[in-house]
Image (tube, rainbow, N blue to C red):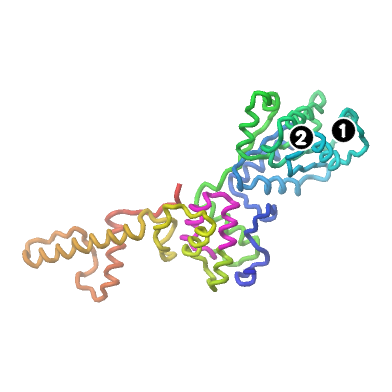
Amino acid sequence: MYKEFYGLTEEPFTLTPNPSFIVFTPSYNEVLASLYYGLENAKGLIVLMGEVGTGKTTALRWILKRLDSSVLAAYVFNPRLSIDEFYHHVTQMLGIKEWNNKAELLNVMGRVLEERHRRGLRTVLIIDEAHELSDYVLEEIRLLLNFESDNAKHLQIILAGQPELREKLNQANLRQLKQRVALRCKMHALPTVEEVEDYITERLSIAGSDQPNIFTPGAVDLLFQCSEGIPRQINNLCDNAMLAGYAAGEQVIGRQIIEEVADNLDLLPSMTNSVAAEQPVENVGSARILTAEAREELWNNRNRLEQKNNSNSNSNSSSNVKPFQTNAPASSGNSSNLKQNTFDEVNDDLLEIEEVGGFY
């Protein structure tokens, strides 16, 4: 709906795990490199864990799309299967059709995997949402790892799931499976406001935008706070914000739109209800330390002190002390400009208030 308005060829912030929109942040690079290393070196069992919405499925689909033609991959995205359903699902994707019972299935699978390994071909089983697997199916997965020769695993398995997967693998009855884990990877949320800004800019660029600053720095900072750096929540906030910006005819999305969208999605932290209104772009690197109310109070206190000082100076010419000394003349013509200039000096020169890179 808003693509033409913002000059885009695609929607940049959909919630589908589209590997075309993957952004290679440092943490993402580390995960993808670890997965590649584990598969390339036939490590056997690899575990990928990450919080909801951090991009595990996107990473898996990116890997799937880039596997060599010599690799046969089976991808299980619905783990709530019985043992029989699990084997039916896997064998169909591996092209194994002629079997009548589990014993026959394992014999056929063993021959297929051994032949593929002999020819230098790889076979990979990827299971998403693995924290939902039953203990019985996880035990079957452990047994599948027994398809091996003296020096190599014939079947590579990736288990991807939420942090609950770690708790499941720590169960006493699954300790044998835990010992088979050769490599663990962890998907992290974006840790800084700078990485969130890079993420947003990169996805806009992939979608065809030639305007990298659709979101102001203040908007990005609030996005970071509301999303906690989780890519799925960033996408949801950005998509809704661009829709709201389109409806309002705003080519640039500011902090106020993000605040309204976050509030509507129940993602607005309670502490940001009184966050400062967005500052001009040149004054905003990230979030301010002080709220607008606190900065106004600081200005009012400074103004009262200066008025008191001027009064004392008029009554006593020998007194030249000013609590807040400024370079601007006391009688400068425009009071609003004086207020802004002296207020900036209070922040930057006297109190040394700095802008920070986000809320942690």
Amino acid residing under circle 2:
Gln
Q: Which residue in the protein does label 1 denote? A: 109
Q: Nearer the viewer, residue 89 or 11?
A: 89
Q: Is residue 217 magenta?
A: yes
Question: Within 10 Å of the Cα at label 1, are there few (<14), some (14-19), or many (20+) other Cα atoms?
Answer: some
**Quick check: 222 left or right of 119?**
left
Kindly identify the residue that appears in the image at 73 percent across and 31 percent down. Answer: 138
Q: Identify the disc placed on residue 260.
A: none
Label 2: element kind: strand
Q: Amino acid at mark 1?
A: Met
- Residue 93: image quadrant is top right
What is the secondary structure assignment of the residue under circle 1? helix
Residue 200, located in which quarter of the rendered image?
bottom right
Query: Where residue 201 sits: x, y (%)?
Result: 57, 59
State left or right for residue 112 relative to residue 133.
right
- Please check the rendered image and state whether residue 114 is part of the magenta-colored stretch, yes or no: no
Asked if residue 114 shows in the view, the reply is no
* Quadrant position of residue 180: top right
Chief secondary structure of the magenta portion: helix
Q: Which residues, given as a range, are shown in magenta?
A: 214-240
Write down the residue under mark 2: 156
Closer to the eye: label 1 or 2: 1
- Residue at (65% x, 63% y) in the render: 11
